Amino acid sequence: MSARAFVDTNVVVYLFDDREPKKRARAVALLERLAQADSVPVVSTQVLQEAYVALTRKVGVPAEEALATLQLMEGASFDVQPVDAKLVWRAAARSAADRLSFWDALVVETARDAGCAVLYSEDLQDGQDFDGVRVANPFG
């Protein structure tokens, strides 16, 4: 089994975004690679919330379809890491220390809490390391 990998909101959204065919293909390829490596990708409750909003407001997916899609992700395809108060406090500290947006810091801290070695995101600097969690931009 390969190292655990956290998947940020943009990867999830691109899986369903027909307006971005190249990014959609890369998101699908990433998940296929993880599956072949016997690695279940990790998302957080924050990622699910953000994905629902992006899918319904930006991509135009009907609310019922977006909800059903995200519900299917849990358990079958993704490991969902809950965000609790301790993660929020650690994210606030990281946000201040590393000058990240709070939301990006929360993703980083949730990935760390889940034991992920890599964080797939286009929102953070490719190659940046956060205490053992390395950022990889699958779209760059």
Image (cartoon, helix red, strand yellow):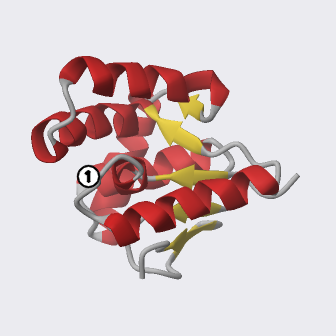
Q: Can you say whether 64 is above or below 130 in the image?
A: above
Q: Please say if 77 is above or below 104.
A: above
Task: Work out whether residue 29 can be spotted.
Answer: yes
Image-based side of 33 in relation to 112, left or right? right
Q: Of residues 66 and 75, which is closer to you in this image? A: 66
Q: Amino acid at mark 1?
A: Phe
Residue at (39%, 19%) from the top-left corner? 68
Q: Nearer the viewer, residue 11 or 95?
A: 11
Instruction: Examine the rendering and report whether any part of residue 84 can be seen.
Output: no
Residue 109 at x, y percent in the picture: 48, 49
For residue 13, above or below residue 29: above
Secondary structure found at label 1: helix
Q: Is residue 99 left or right of residue 28?
A: left
x, y percent for residue 50: 27, 39
Which residue sits furthest right?
1
Position of residue 17 measured from the top left corner of the image (x, y, whole percent): 29, 52
User: Total of numbered circles in the picture?
Assistant: 1
Q: Label 1 belongs to which residue?
A: 102
Residue at 70%, 42% in the rendered image: 40
Is 118 in front, or is 12? 12
In the picture, which quadrant includes the C terminus?
bottom left
Horizontal and vertical percent for residue 45?
A: 42, 30
Q: Residues within 10 Å of mark 1 (few under 14, many from 20)?
A: some
The one of 81 and 37 positioned closer to us in this rendering: 37
Q: Is residue 63 left or right of residue 47?
A: left
Query: Residue at the location (27% across, 69% down)?
Result: 99
Q: Can you name the residue that lies furthest to the left here? A: 57
